[in-house]
Amino acid sequence: MSEHVPSEQLSVEHLLGIKELSADDIELIFRTADGFKEVLNRPIKKVPSLRDITIANLFFESSTRTRVSFELAEKRLSADVVNFSSSGSSVSKGETLVDTVNNILAMKVDMVVMRHPDPGAGVFLSRHVDARIVNAGDGTHEHPTQALLDAYSIREKLGRVKGVKVLIVGDILHSRVALSNIFCLQKLGAEVMLCGPRTLMPRYINTLGVRVEPDLDKALKWCDVANMLRIQLERQGGDGVANFPSLREYAMRYGLDLERYRRLGKEIVIMHPGPINRGVEVTSEVADHANSIILDQVENGVAIRMAVLYLLAARIPRTGV
Ligand code: CP
């Protein structure tokens, strides 16, 4: 089992979404990530915490940041890692999700990190297989580790999350990042405002307890932090931009360029979950601006994922040696 057992535990056995976490769970993940961040700045960036744990990374949808970040987190914790992607696998021969995962688990896997295009895929899996499940993004539903690393990065930059005014801009309708961020920020006491085309706002928006401001300049004036979401071209349907007239018009109304930023007359923190469509959600000058924490988000992702895996591994039932 783990070399180091945490003194405190999460209230959940799987990380399926932020909705199921308490504020105490999130604070515990942050405190644990603080320790791992210190490890990641050492010359030897590795600890033996998950030395006899095996983790399968199952990616049924494309990913760069999340996939590399989880694999690095697992290796920094000394876990054994197996990677699976649906392309080139027996999924293309008609094998079901449960059969695929049970076959992998038969090889004695303890934890599964899964990205899947279907909302609820992680919940489904947690009910049918005997392993800890970490949701690495399920369709348009949740992306919990992204929200955790986003809130952690705000805490690092501003020293707190409580009371911070966070604006989330863009494709809210298709965004698992938006939903997880809303839940996470609200649990930590931040104020949340959304801005974007009406056609990219979900119908249930009024149930989320957030403000909605259609005018980006007014919304930017209000906020301390602007999280500029990626336009999910692959989920728009039709010609790819069916929910707004053109990418050019989107960029004019909802994109952040240097001129718009300077017009604000105040400093705000700029975030983006990646991958960036440069020139659409933000221009290169804004993405690379001194107040952009986009690469800090990526860096913090490793420490956050180490914390999540470490805390969930402590919840794996153990038989005596
Ligand atoms: N932010 C994020 O989930 O990026 P990837 O799709 O590259 O993993």
Image (cartoon, rainbow, N blue to C red):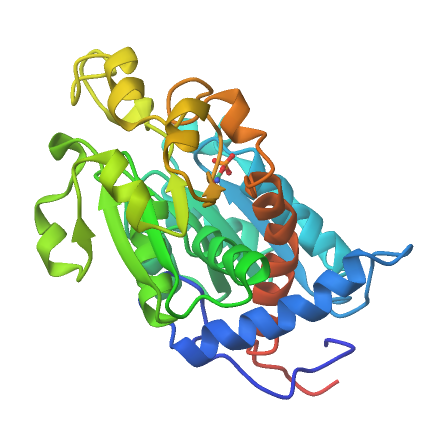
Query: In this rendering, is residue 8 above or below 274?
Result: below
Q: Quadrant of residue 29?
A: bottom right
For this view, does 161 lie left or right of residue 104? left
Query: In this rendering, is residue 202 above or below 186?
Result: above
Foreground of the two, 208 or 52: 208
Foreground of the two, 14 or 209: 209
Foreground of the two, 108 or 61: 61
For this view, does 308 lie left or right of residue 17? right
Residue 253 is situated, as x and y percent measured from the top left of the image, at: 24, 23
Residue 32 is situated, as x and y percent measured from the top left of the image, at: 63, 72
Location of the N terminus by quadrant is: bottom right
Can see residue 18?
no
Query: In this rendering, is residue 213 above or below 94?
Result: below
Q: Residue at x 67, y 68 (%)?
A: 34
Q: What count of labels does the image hold?
A: 0
Location of the C terminus by quadrant is: bottom right
Residue 195 is situated, as x and y percent measured from the top left of the image, at: 23, 40
Residue 202 is situated, as x and y percent measured from the top left of the image, at: 14, 43
Q: Residue at x 37, y 37 (%)?
A: 264
Can see residue 315?
yes
Q: Residue at x 69, y 88 (%)?
A: 320
Q: Quadrant of residue 60?
A: top left
Q: Residue at x 16, y 37 (%)?
A: 214
Q: Quadrant of residue 40?
A: bottom right
Question: Which residue extends farthest right?
Answer: 43
Question: Which residue extends farthest front?
Answer: 265
